[in-house]
Image (cartoon, rainbow, N blue to C red):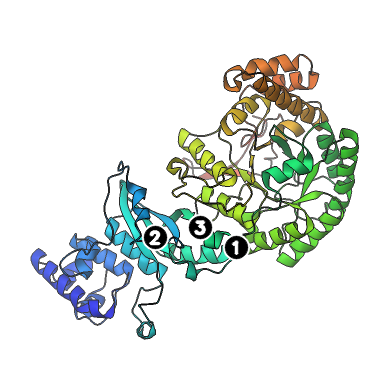
Amino acid sequence: MATKKDELPQLAQNMRRIMGEMGFNASDLSKKSGVSVASLSRILGGQVNPGINHISAISKALEVSIDSLVLPNGVHAVTQKYTPDDSTTKQHHEEASLRSETDILVSFILEDTDYTPNEAARLLANAATASWVHSWTQDLVDTENASYPKPTIAMQVGHRKISVDVAFPESLFEEGSIVSLISVITASCTSTGARVDDIRIPPVLLRTYSGPSFGVQGLRDKTQKYGRPLLSATMRPITGLSPRMFANAVFETLKGGVDITCDPTLLHSVPSNNWRDRFNYVSEAVSDAQYYSDELKLHAANVTASTVEEMLLRAEYAAEHGTHAVMVDSGAVGWSGVQSLAKFCQENKLTLCALGGRALHNGPLSQQLVAKLLRFAGADIVSVGSPLRGTAMARRNVKGITRSLEAHNMPAFPEGLIMFDQPTCGIQASWPACGGGHNAWHFPQLIDALGNDIIIQCGGSTMGHPWGSLSGATANRVALEALIQARIAGKNLAADGRNILQDAAKNSPELKEALQYWKEGAFLFGVISNNDKANLDGVIIKDKKKTKLKSIDTED
C-alpha cells in the first residue's frame, strides 16, 4: 500500500512526530522494524513511496496503525467496524450510495492479520486498482467518469480476522468470461494474503454465461430416471488394466445397476491404456450395458490433455462413439479449458463432468464459490465432498457447495460461505457428485442430508464387493431403491435406515453380503481396506533418535 505523491510529506511528518514521542532515532527504528537506515532516511525526507512491507513493518515497530502514518488527523473512515454477532452486517449492501445494482460484489477475508478494518479496506482497494504507487498516467484519467472498485463494508469477524466487501464495476469485466472475472477479482489477493469467500454476479453479467447443457432436470429427462439420486462409480485400479479389461469392468458395473461410470481423474493416455483404444472398447461396453439393462447409461470419458485442442479432439471422438459424457480435471486444465470444453459439449449434446479431488480447489477461492462458477461455466456434474465426514463446520460447507450447484435464486447462507443473495437468471442446476468411499450403510444419511438431486459416488464399494463389481453395483442399486420406496411410504431414513437396509437384504444376497463385508458406517476413502501388503521392500526410513537409516521389515 504505497502512498500517493501528495501523501509523502504527511507520512514523513507523522513518522517524525511519532518517533519523537517514543524517543526513537532512525537507527532505533531500523533495528526494530528491519527497514534499513538508508530507506528510512529517504522516507523521512519524503523522497520515496514505501511499499506495503515497509509501511507495515514501520507501523508495527512504532505500535501504531498504518492509517495513523499515512493519513492526516487519524483515520478517514470509508467503512465501519462491527462485532461478529452484528445481525445487520449484510444490510449495508442495499445502500445505493455504496454500490450499483450492476456491480459485482466480492467478499474478501484476511486472516491472522494486524490490520484494522479500515486499513484492510484501503489495502484491498489499492490492490484491486493496481494503485500501489502514483504514476504520471493517472493524471490522464477522467476520474469523474472512470470506474473503480470500492470497499462497501469492512468488519472484524474474529481474532485477527477481517472481512471486507468490495463492489467492482461491471465495466471492468469481459462478458461471458469466467477467466476475466477471476483475474480482475483475485488481483486484490496479490501480496495481501486475502482469500475470496463469495462473489455476487449481477444479472447483467450472469446472462452472458452459458451454464450446464443438461443440468439436473435435463439429465433426468435424458436418462428417464426420476425420484431418486443417481449412482456413479469410478473404475479402478488406475494402472495395470488394458483397454479391453477396463471396458469389461465398465460393462459389469453399468449392467449391475450403476447409472454412470467414470474414468479415473489420473488416467489420461498411457502406453498400457491408450485413450483411443479405451474409448473404443468402453463405447461398446456402454452399448451392451444399455441393451441388457434397458436403461440409458453414461460413461464419463476423461479428456484431460495437454492442450485445449487435444481435449476437444478427444471429446469429439467420445461423442462419435456414444459414451454420452466427458470428464475433465478442472483444477488442472483451468477455466479457459473448462469453458472451451463446455461450449463443445453444448454443441454436441455431451454431458460435462468436472470430477476429481481438485475440482473445487482453485487458489484463493472458496470451494462453494468454485462450485458456483463451474455451474455458470457449464459443468453438468461437479465433484463435492461428503457431508458425512469431518466436523459440523465441514458439513455446513458441503451444504453451501450443494446449494450453489442446485439452488435457483439462492438466498445468502453465511454458514455455507454463501455471503450474498445470488440470482441465477434461469441457469440450470448442476448435479453434485458426493464422494467418496460411500457404501450402502451411508445411503440413508446422504439422502436425508442432501435429498434426491445428488449423485452418490460409490466406486469403492461397487468395485470392491467380494463377488465382483456386478454384485457390488446390484447391492448398491437395491439399497438405494429400497430406501426411496420406504421414504415414499413415510419412513424416516435417518432413524429407520438401518432396518430398511436389513429388510431389503433378505431378498438380495448381493446386498446382504455387502452389508456384512463393509463395516457399518465405515468409509473406504483414505485408508485402503484390504489384506494386501504394500511393496515396502525398497523403502528406508530414518530413525530420528538414532539418526541412521534402516530397512522396513515387511514381515512384522
Task: Tell me if 238 is positioned left or right of 539 in this view.
Answer: right
Q: Say if 147 sits above or below 217 in the image.
A: below
Q: Which mark is residue 208?
A: 1
Q: Which mark is residue 166?
A: 2
Marks 1/3: CA distance?
11 Å
Percent position of residue 411, x then y: 48, 44
Query: Which secondary structure, mark 3?
Result: loop
Query: Which secondary structure, mark 2?
Result: strand
Q: Which mark is residue 201?
A: 3
Check contact, mark 2 vs mark 1: CB within 8 A. Answer: no
Q: Residues within 10 Å of mark 2 (few under 14, many from 20)?
A: many
Disc 2 residue type? Val
Quarter location, residue 316: bottom right
Check contact, mark 1 vs mark 3: CB within 8 A. Answer: no
- Residue located 76% across and 34% down the image: 463
- Answer with mark 1 or mark 3, whichever residue precedes in sequence: 3
